[in-house]
Image: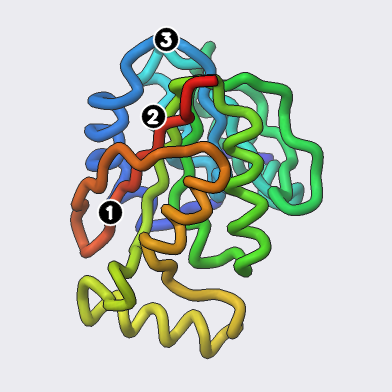
């Protein structure tokens, strides 16, 4: 794939620096990081070189891997590994343990069984005391945090009734059932948030 064929998402360009700023505060210790739903590969290519203490493994469904690989080659970061195919609900997960898991803008696209599979998989590969950071728009106790998120939710559900902005309470319930405890809710630009959970000690 030529450089000109790298996929590009404006939103990934816009949110990468704010997200990196939070990961720098939380993902401090050296270790392995698993990225779920790496998409275009822009986040991996931007963040991995700036988080050199992490071994970054990007994953996504198979059809996205060529684009992620194009960004990886452009980044030429020694700690950014070749992308791996992972459908969270269907494929075997990479062998852990990982100290960190990171995912952006995924759970509102996945149907609910896929969200359940994602949390179960994260809990299965995170090492004890490891952290899971999830970025995106979220509702709170049944209410959207901004009108723009409400519009986005309606748009998603019109495209596919199985998609939609997820409620933090529902995600916390899934996390708790999997042995994950929420550590933080970090407000981000354009009405998004980063939710951070910690894997319970064994």
**Image quadrant where residue 43 sits:** top left
> Spatial distance from mark 3 to mark 1, Cα to Cα?
24 Å
- In the rendered image, the quadrant that contains the C terminus is top right
Dot 1 crowding, Cα within 10 Å, few <14, some 14–19, many 20+: some
Q: Nearer the viewer, mark 1 or mark 2?
A: 1
Q: Is residue 108 above or below residue 65?
A: below
Q: Position of residue 41 (x, y in %)?
A: 53, 41
Q: Which residue is mark 3?
A: 30
Which numbered marker is on residue 29?
none
The residue closer to the viewer here, 40 or 124, is 124
Q: Which residue is mark 1?
A: 193
Q: Position of residue 85 (x, y in %)?
A: 74, 40
SS assignment at label 1: strand
> Spatial distance from mark 2 to mark 3, Cα to Cα?
14 Å
> Spatial distance from mark 1 to mark 2, Cα to Cα?
18 Å
Marked residue nearer the N-terminal end (1 or 2)? 2
The residue closer to the viewer here, 10 or 196, is 196
Q: Residue drawn 50% across and 33% down?
A: 101
| Residues tagged 3 and 1 counted as in contact (Cβ below 8 A) | no
């Amino acid at each position: 794939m030529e450089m000109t064929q790298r996929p590009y998402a404006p939103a990934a360009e816009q949110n990468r620096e704010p997200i990196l700023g939070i990961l720098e505060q939380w993902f401090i210790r050296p270790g392995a990081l698993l990225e779920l739903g790496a998409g275009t590969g822009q986040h991996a290519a931007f963040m991995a070189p700036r988080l050199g203490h992490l071994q970054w493994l990007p994953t996504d469904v198979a059809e996205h891997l060529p684009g992620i690989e194009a960004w990886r080659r452009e980044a030429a970061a020694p700690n950014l590994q070749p992308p791996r195919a992972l459908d969270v609900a269907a494929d075997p997960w990479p062998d852990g343990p990982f100290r960190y898991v990171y995912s952006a803008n995924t759970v509102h696209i996945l149907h609910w069984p896929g969200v359940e599979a994602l949390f179960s998989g994260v809990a299965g590969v995170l090492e004890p005391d490891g952290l899971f950071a999830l970025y995106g728009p979220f509702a709170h106790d049944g209410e959207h945090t901004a009108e723009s998120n409400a519009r986005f939710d309606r748009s998603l559900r019109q495209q596919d009734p199985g998609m939609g902005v997820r409620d933090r309470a529902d995600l916390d319930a899934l996390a708790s059932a999997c042995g994950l405890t929420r550590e933080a809710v970090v407000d981000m630009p354009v009405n998004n948030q980063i939710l951070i959970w910690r894997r319970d000690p064994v």
